[in-house]
Image (cartoon, rainbow, N blue to C red):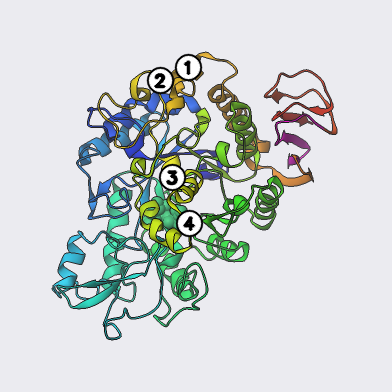
């Protein structure tokens, strides 16, 4: 029997944008509870919630001011307990986001640290500057420098993300203890694991000046350092090993070699990681530097990771990435189905992001005023420095902004897509009149129903869940793979283009996006098929 997290698919919920139960325009935990039957009907087994902890919301909850409480905008601790209990009763497990590289600057630890109150003096990375200049030349993931001066303490603190997200100091054993207590708190309450935010950045080797010519100056001193491996081993030993749980690390810019180390069961660090490489299929390293999407680039990276790791997380979308159907497809339901087919048939634990099962697309905002995301806003000065005018900056946002994934879940064709009875915190996409759960529910050919069909097939197929992966062929516009377990195999072929393609493929598919008639060396536009062989 395989581990449960190798058998089941994960569904990511971005709570702010999932379902609003009280009309304040903000999704909440009672809203998620009300959708549990829908989630169950998808066939997924695990829900990962983006942060619901107390937070001032500068980075939509990734800036935590109290790890052991729920933010009032999402509900209460007892709502969370109810969610865990009701989900469990349906056979669904809950996984929380663990954001421990940094806290909010509103966290009590930081407030005390800036006043040098014991035992918090060294909870963060404080340094004196060089005259009026920050301690080193590191830059932030969100643009600009990675240091802020605090008037109260009279020193600079490091923030790899927004100014309101000071980095914790893992050289201080009290920080490690405090973080372990947080993990324990939630695991004891019944959560089944963590998605570990930017977990490969925890350990800063030194604070020397970084190589000045790079997108992320200083990153050579903090990405995947040995100290980070040691921390992860300690978390596993001291806390995680006492529970039936799993961890998936968000590991920024990780290589396959590093990923193998991080997920090696003998080292006891993480169970899976999110690779970033395939997210570069339409950009150079960072999404603000776009290039034309090439199917081959996407395939090549996905396959490389399939081959190099015995098991890993597989995803095409999350709350930081634009919608896959807009990036890698042509916004059509047909392309959404093709993508979901590959996602659910590669080897590994699939992660599906809310709305991906409906074929939700990038936003339809018309101006910068509609954009809410701190990263997008912070990037504007950097893009201006690169010489882009307002129009071109907005064009870049349309392609790259994280708000593309954060528009509210589209439940109905009605007002605000059925997300809220009030005014949503971020605009609902106008295409909710056609792309929504209620309409798709009734259409046997919808993306939603294709997703359910595939999930049901996957849940019943040991070959798809456990089988080895082999690439049969990848061409400019199509891919053919094999999954094999013992003598049984499933062939999956996907036409990743809006034109028919010719390929060596005959037989009757057990599942097809276009009907199960005999295949004759041709796939229709965006057609995806599964063929069983025993
Ligand atoms: O979103 C990105 C690029 O647009 C990434 O650089 C992202 O910031 C990086 O993957 C880290 O993401 C995680 O930590 C951030 C938070 O803003 C993201 O939402 C989260 O997924 C800081 O906590």
Mark 2 or mark 4, whichever is nearer to me:
4
Label 4: element kind: loop
Residue at the disc numbered 2: 412
Chief secondary structure of the magenta span?
strand
Taking 207 as reference, is 526 left or right? right
- Whether label 3 lies within 8 Å of ligand 1 gets the answer yes
Q: Tell me which numbered mark, 1 or 2, is placed earlier along the sequence.
A: 2
Kindly identify which numbered label has been placed on residue 388: 4
Label 2: element kind: loop
In space, the residues marked 2 and 4 are separated at their CA atoms by 38 Å
Q: Residues within 10 Å of mark 1 (few under 14, many from 20)?
A: some
Label 1: element kind: helix
Q: Tell me which numbered mark, 4 or 3, is placed earlier along the sequence.
A: 3
In space, the residues marked 1 and 2 are separated at their CA atoms by 7 Å
Q: Residues within 10 Å of mark 4 (few under 14, many from 20)?
A: some
Residue 196 visible, this orientation:
no
Q: Tell me which numbered mark, 3 or 2, is placed earlier along the sequence.
A: 3
Taking 215 as reference, is 375 left or right? left
Q: Is residue 485 magenta?
A: yes
Q: Tell me which numbered mark, 1 or 3, is placed earlier along the sequence.
A: 3
């Amino acid at each position: 029997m395989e581990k449960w997290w190798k058998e089941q698919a994960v569904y990511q919920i971005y709570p702010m944008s999932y379902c609003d139960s009280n009309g304040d325009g903000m999704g909440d935990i009672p809203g998620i509870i009300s959708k549990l039957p829908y989630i169950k009907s998808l066939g997924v087994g695990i829900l990962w919630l983006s942060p619901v902890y107390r937070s001032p919301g500068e980075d939509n909850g990734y800036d935590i001011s109290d790890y052991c409480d729920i933010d009032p905008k999402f509900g209460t601790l007892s709502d969370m307990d109810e969610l865990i209990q009701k989900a469990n009763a349906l056979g669904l497990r809950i996984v929380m986001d663990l954001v421990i590289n940094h806290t909010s600057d509103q966290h009590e630890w930081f407030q005390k640290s800036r006043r040098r109150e014991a035992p918090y003096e060294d909870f963060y990375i404080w340094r004196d500057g060089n005259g009026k200049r920050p301690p080193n030349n590191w830059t932030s993931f969100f643009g600009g420098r990675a240091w802020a001066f605090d008037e109260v303490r009279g020193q600079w603190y490091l923030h790899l993300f927004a100014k309101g997200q000071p980095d914790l100091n893992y050289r201080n054993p009290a920080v490690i203890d405090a973080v372990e207590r947080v993990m324990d708190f939630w695991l004891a309450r019944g959560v089944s694991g963590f998605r570990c935010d930017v977990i490969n950045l925890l350990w800063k080797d030194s604070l020397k000046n970084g190589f000045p010519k790079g997108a992320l100056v200083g990153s050579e001193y903090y990405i995947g350092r040995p100290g980070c491996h040691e921390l992860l081993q300690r978390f596993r030993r001291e806390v995680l090993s006492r529970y039936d749980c799993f961890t998936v690390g968000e590991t920024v810019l990780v290589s396959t070699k590093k990923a193998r180390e991080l997920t090696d069961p003998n080292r006891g660090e993480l169970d899976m990681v999110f690779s970033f490489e395939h997210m570069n299929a339409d950009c150079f390293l960072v999404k603000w530097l776009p290039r034309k999407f090439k199917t081959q680039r996407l395939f090549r990276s996905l396959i490389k990771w399939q081959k190099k790791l015995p098991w890993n997380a597989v995803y095409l979308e999350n709350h930081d990435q634009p919608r896959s159907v807009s990036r890698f497809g042509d916004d059509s339901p047909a392309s959404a189905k093709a993508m979901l087919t590959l996602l659910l048939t590669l080897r590994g634990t699939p992660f599906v992001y809310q709305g991906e099962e409906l074929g939700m697309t990038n936003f339809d905002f018309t101006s910068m005023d509609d954009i809410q995301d701190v990263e997008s806003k912070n990037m504007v000065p950097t893009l201006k420095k690169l010489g882009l005018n307002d129009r071109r900056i907005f064009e870049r946002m349309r392609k790259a902004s994280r708000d593309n994934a954060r528009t509210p879940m589209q439940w109905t064709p009605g007002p605000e897509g059925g997300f809220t009875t009030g005014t949503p915190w971020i605009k609902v996409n106008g295409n909710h009149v056609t792309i929504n759960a209620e309409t798709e529910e009734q259409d046997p050919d919808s993306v939603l129903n294709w997703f359910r069909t595939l999930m049901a097939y996957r849940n019943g197929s040991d070959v798809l869940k456990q089988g080895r992966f082999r690439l049969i062929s990848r061409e400019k516009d199509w891919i053919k793979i094999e999954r094999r377990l013992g003598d049984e195999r499933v062939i999956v072929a996907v036409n990743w283009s809006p034109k028919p393609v010719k390929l060596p493929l005959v037989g009757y598919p057990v599942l097809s996006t276009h009907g199960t008639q005999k295949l004759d060396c041709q796939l229709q536009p965006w057609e995806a098929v599964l063929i069983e062989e025993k």
